[in-house]
Amino acid sequence: MIIVLKPNTSKEQADEIQRRIEAKGLKPLYLPGTERVVLGAIGDERVLAQLHLEGHPQVESVKPILSPHKLVGREFHPHDSIVKIAGVPVGGERFVVIAGPCAVESYQQMTDTAKAVKSAGAAVVRGGAFKPRTSPYAFQGLGVAGLEILHKVSKEQGIPYVTEVVEVADVELVAKDSDALQVGARNMQNYRLLSALGHCGKPVLLKRGPAAELKELLLAAEYIVNEGNPDVIFCERGIRTFETATRNTLDLNAVPFLKQRSHLPVMVDPSHGTGVRSLVTPMARAAVAAGADGILVEVHVDPSVALSDGAQSLYPQQFAELMEGIKPFVQAAGRTL
Ligand code: PEP
Ligand code: MN
């Protein structure tokens, strides 16, 4: 329910209405605007009807929130949210590039990659310590040792990092030092994990499941925000279709769709979205044009020996060319790198 208050309403009067909402077991929200205050009430709207707020002298109007994803939707929160990854603002004017290997393999590999992507203009480095792999025989990541490498390299090279968390038991450990936590495509509907991330105190990069509808992605984000963490960034990473020429089909419809429905930032991962190195840069340009707030790109110092996702990983030189290649698109989109 959206409760629009009259322009002359004092903070005390607004507080009193919020207390009445809370007393009914609903979650009150306070949104001060330039002209008037808007309150929200999240929960069973039939209960709210018992308060008869339409008759309150300070209430101008009461409207139901129609979308099922009330917290991440734009209805109640019309302005874009900016989510900061260690001070790097995602969702504002800046187009944010996150780059790095699929998996952390060694201190040297991570150091060389962090140096290369930072000097080419990436704002954040990535690398998986815990890897959710399709095959149990594939490299599963270095685990805790990988986290330690990421932390050290990030400090030494002066660049924040994002890394994946694959299960509830690891949330605290991964959240301790990292600047943002990634939820991989395979875990988008792991609701226990999403709820736990609502308390992790760090931004969450939420990837779309390979067979998830966009409304399911919105509701997955709602789980995290509903538990108290407003800092969620969507990431479109391609979905499974009948097409086999590419690893996934990068659904760029998702970008304007999510931007229209939600106030949260939207990033695009053209690496997993295509699975093909030569397609990454063209689709990165397309992501900028579609209105994405940033991209997530896999870069490896030597993709020919990468322990995971080598075929889609860019060589550092190719990443530098990608950064040059997106510049005119970023400028045309009215943004900065
Ligand atoms: C990754 O980012 O390396 C990854 C595992 O991605 P996804 O969850 O999108 O497959
Ligand atoms: Mn990968």
Image (cartoon, helix red, strand yellow):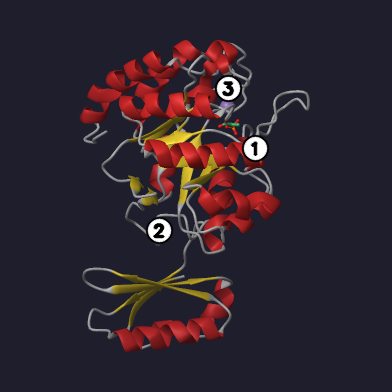
Name the residue beneath numbered marker 1: 130
State the residue in front, 158 or 78.
158
Residue sitting at x 70%, y 25%: 139
Q: Is mark 3 within 8 Å of ligand 1?
A: no
State the residue in front, 9 or 57.
9
Residue 265 pos. (x, y %): 40, 45
Q: Amino acid at mark 2?
A: Glu
Res 121 quadrant in image: top left
**Which numbered disc, 3 or 2, marks the residue closer to the eye?**
3
Q: Amino acid at mark 3?
A: Asn
**Dot 2 crowding, Cα within 10 Å, few <14, some 14–19, many 20+:** some
Name the residue beneath numbered marker 2: 75
Label 2: which secondary element: loop
Residue sitting at x 58%, y 75%: 46
**Which numbered disc, 3 or 1, marks the residue closer to the eye?**
1
State how far apart marks 3 and 2 are (Cα). 32 Å
Q: Disc 2, disc 1: CB below 8 Å?
A: no
**Dot 3 crowding, Cα within 10 Å, few <14, some 14–19, many 20+:** many
**Which numbered disc, 2 or 1, marks the residue closer to the eye?**
1
Name the residue beneath numbered marker 3: 248
**Dot 1 crowding, Cα within 10 Å, few <14, some 14–19, many 20+:** many
